Image (cartoon, rainbow, N blue to C red):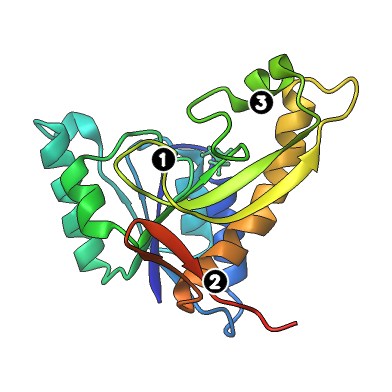
Amino acid sequence: KRTVVLISGRGSNMTALIAAASDPSFPAEIAGVISDKADAAGLVIARARGIATQVISRADHGSKQAHDAAIDAALAAFNADIVALAGYMRILTPGFVQKWQGRMINIHPALLPAFKGLDTHARALAAGIRIHGCTVHFVTSEMDDGPIIAQAAVPVMVGDNTDTLAARVLKAEHRLYPLALGLVAEGKARMEEGRAVLAHFAD
Ligand code: GRF
């Protein structure tokens, strides 16, 4: 399945997806990377790995709708089957989300439905939880609210600060996102009637 990754910054999850997809047996290939920021560090990494990149910035478009229409056109040009949001820091318009529903996934640095939105690690520490983690979910029009595909948990250690906790979660993200993309690309995780349907693995 041809997958296009949308980023806004560092691109470490994008890098993990590119690395996983470089294995010919992986069910998805990274067809391109789109960033809304021309200075996103992830663009440099993607180019160095030979992946086609495109910058589509909000400032070059008159409205959010026009911006998302340009992204949609780029996805069509890439022949995208799947869209993977990886630190893409904009809310997508409902029409765009609707069009890609079931084919667009996101990674969130918390165990949803806890800690939607930003600053998840600071809020996790403030709440005093002892287990934290990350989630890959199908994207719906409600932010960080779509059907869950996969999650990974990490402990919160005594003495953690946001940096140490974020680093531990990020390591888990880099394992979880390729796994979840693989499930979607193989059709083992699907979205039906607003819910995630996961393949049953015989034990
Ligand atoms: C990750 O923590 C991801 O979960 C969140 O934004 C961050 C992006 O980091 N959505 P990177 O750009 O993948 O390094």
Q: Residues within 10 Å of mark 3 (few under 14, many from 20)?
A: many
For the C terminus, the image quarter is: bottom right
Say what amino acid the circle numbered 3 marks. Answer: His
Nearest to the observer: residue 4 or residue 53: 4
Whether residue 87 is situated above or below residue 186 in the rendered picture:
above
Per the image, the residue denoted by label 1 is 88
Which element carries disc 2, helix, strand or loop?
helix
* Residue at disc 1, CB closer than 8 Å to ligand 1: yes
Q: Is residue 201 left or right of residue 74?
A: right
Q: Residue at x 25, y 49 (%)?
A: 97
Circle 1 residues within 10 Å: few <14, some 14–19, many ≥20: many
Q: Quadrant of the N terminus?
A: bottom left
- Residue sticking out furthest to the top: 126
Asked if one can make out residue 71 in the rendered structure from this viewpoint, the answer is no
Q: Local crowd at mark 2 within 10 Å, few (<14), some, or many (≥20)? A: many
Mark 2 and mark 3 lie on one chain; the one further toward the N terminus is 3
Residue 118 shown left or right of residue 156 in the figure: left
Which amino acid does the dot numbered 1 rest on? Tyr
Tell me which residue sits at (22%, 52%) in the image: 98
Q: Quick check: which quadrant has ligand 1?
A: top right
Q: Residue 96: x, y in percent?
A: 20, 49
Q: Nearer the viewer, mark 3 or mark 1?
A: 3
Q: Nearer the viewer, residue 2 or 202?
A: 202
Q: Which mark is residue 182?
A: 2
Is tag 2's residue or tag 1's residue first in the polypeptide sequence? 1
